Image (cartoon, rainbow, N blue to C red):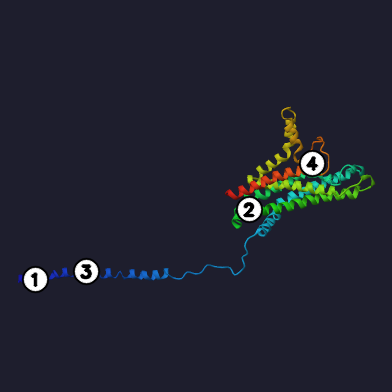
Amino acid sequence: MTGPTTTGSATTTGSATTTGSATAAGPATAAGPATTTGSAATTGSARRPESYSSPLPTPRPHLGHALASEWTKLTSVRSTVWTLSSLVVLVVGVGLLFVAQTDDPDYVRIPFTTPALFGLLVGQLSVMVLGVLTMTSEYGTGLIRTTFTAAPERHRVLTAKYIVFSIAAFLTTAGSVAVVGLSAAILHNGPGAGGHSGSEWTNGLLGSLYVTLLGVLALAIGALVRHSAGAIAVMLGVVTLPPVIGAMLSAWEFGAPVGAAVLRHNAPVALMELFGLPSGIGADVPGKASHMVLILLVTGAAVVASYVVVGRRDV
């Protein structure tokens, strides 16, 4: 009896044969889902959509676009209105006050545009402030990053700023001088006023151009400094310090030659000479051409430096 039972236990070893089901490893061979990665491959090789192209014409950017942009920015901020308005009020207001206080014989020695000089000596500060803000206001607000992103060619942006500012400053200054000159001519163009020629109007235009170049110099300084207060301080020093420094140097014997040269070459003296008003510092005062050449050289050097620095410096 025991024999059959032992053989039964032997048959239980048949359960060992059931391990053959492990060899079947059907689930392992069911790794067929790995073959489904082929579908992923097919999706990877799917055709990509073509890049978008606008149906609207996209012209190549040029200087005209930059000019339009700078004109919009210049005319849409309040600083432009305030600075140019103060220039007009100072030149026209002070000029008409002097016109009302003068008589016909006074214009025998001076041109009709001379009364505009007195307001312009102060009004030039407004032009310089506007020149500084034309550049530094964008650095203060961070708009300069957007500007240079939209127009990566920075020299084009800088050129547009110089052109737009120069036109606005010159037209406003020359128009204010013309109003004062015409008022003086209408009120005092009598027999006692002496003869007048068209050269005095040319002198008024030269004076307006000189002030405009001071504003361009201020814009260039703003591009170099990138700070409104600092650039305005530099321009105030350029205009107001030379007469003071010249007077101080003239007090010492060793500095007298330099002091005399500084007194002859500064903005107030240049404007007085350009408008035909005697400066009262002697007969060695440079002529109109010398003053214009000097301001052109100084402004040109600052403008060239601004192109180099703005083109290389990170914003």
> Disc 2 to disc 1, how far (Cα)?
103 Å
Label 1 vs label 3, nearer the camera: 3
> Disc 1 to disc 4, how far (Cα)?
136 Å
The residue where tag 2 is placed is 155
Establish if 147 lies above or below 97. below
The residue where tag 3 is placed is 23
Residue 41 x, y percent position in the rendering: 39, 69
Sequence-first tag of 1 and 3: 1
Callout 1: few (<14), some (14-19), or many (20+) C-alpha neighbours within 10 Å?
few
Sequence-first tag of 1 and 4: 1
> Disc 2 to disc 4, how far (Cα)?
34 Å
- Secondary structure beneath dot 3 equals helix
Sequence-first tag of 2 and 1: 1
The residue where tag 1 is placed is 7
> Disc 3 to disc 4, how far (Cα)?
111 Å
As shown in the figure, which amino acid type bears the numbered disc 4? Gly
Q: Residue at x 79, y 41 (%)?
A: 287
